[in-house]
Amino acid sequence: MKASFVVPELAKWDVLTEAPELLVAPFFSDERPLKGVAGLADWRLCGRLSRLFSIQRVTGEFGETTLLPASRVGFAKLVLLGLGIAQEFNEERFCSAMRLIERVAAELGSQRIALALPGRGTGQIRARRAMELCRDDGALEGLEVLLIETLAGQKDMGDFMVKSR
């Protein structure tokens, strides 16, 4: 995985040069209001994601994927990725979600993606541990990834990436 970082702020996304085509927004089925990347996308899309949940077109069940246009968010495509119930999220589910992200990116022909790692937007998994699991599982190999992460998380992830070279 070739990784770069951006903070989870819409103003930063607006000035990205050569933004990836695909934005992946993981979220939990019991997460309301939406947080992290999904919450920012919902805000920018004037509550469209919240409306999809309210009419149960999107549930957040683990493994559920929903593809939407996302030009107002700064990316061509948005994939909502259901992570299931927050309390059931663990390292095994993290790895399964990462494999699903790989598959979806391949199916959409996307070599460059932007995402917040599953569970990071709500603190369900620590930044360093997420990177360890990605390395150990070989997640996102061959992809160019723009990680949407807080400054503190970027530091932890960056330190890990430098040490593991």
Image (cartoon, grey):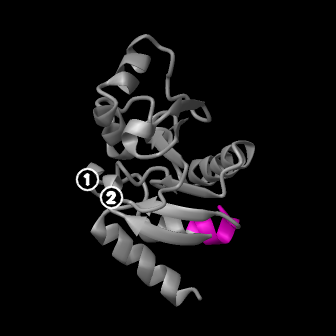
Whole-number angstrom distance, CA of label 2 to CA of label 1: 7 Å
Q: Is residue 115 left or right of residue 30?
A: right
Question: Which residue is most to the top?
Answer: 55
Q: Residues within 10 Å of mark 1 (few under 14, many from 20)?
A: few
Q: Are marks 2 and 1 in contact (CB under 8 Å)?
A: yes
> Quarter of the image containing the N terminus?
bottom right
Residue at 35% x, 54% y is: 13
Q: Quadrant of residue 87?
A: top left
Q: Which residues are magenta?
A: 133-141
Q: Is residue 122 above or below residue 129?
A: above
Secondary-structure class at tag 1: helix
Q: Residues within 10 Å of mark 2 (few under 14, many from 20)?
A: few
Residue 120 percent location from the top left of the image: 41, 54
Q: Which residue is mark 2?
A: 15
Q: Is residue 23 above or below residue 49?
A: below
Q: Which residue is mark 1?
A: 11
The answer to whether residue 1 shows anywhere in this view is: yes
Q: Nearer the viewer, residue 66 or 35?
A: 66
Q: Amino acid at mark 2?
A: Val
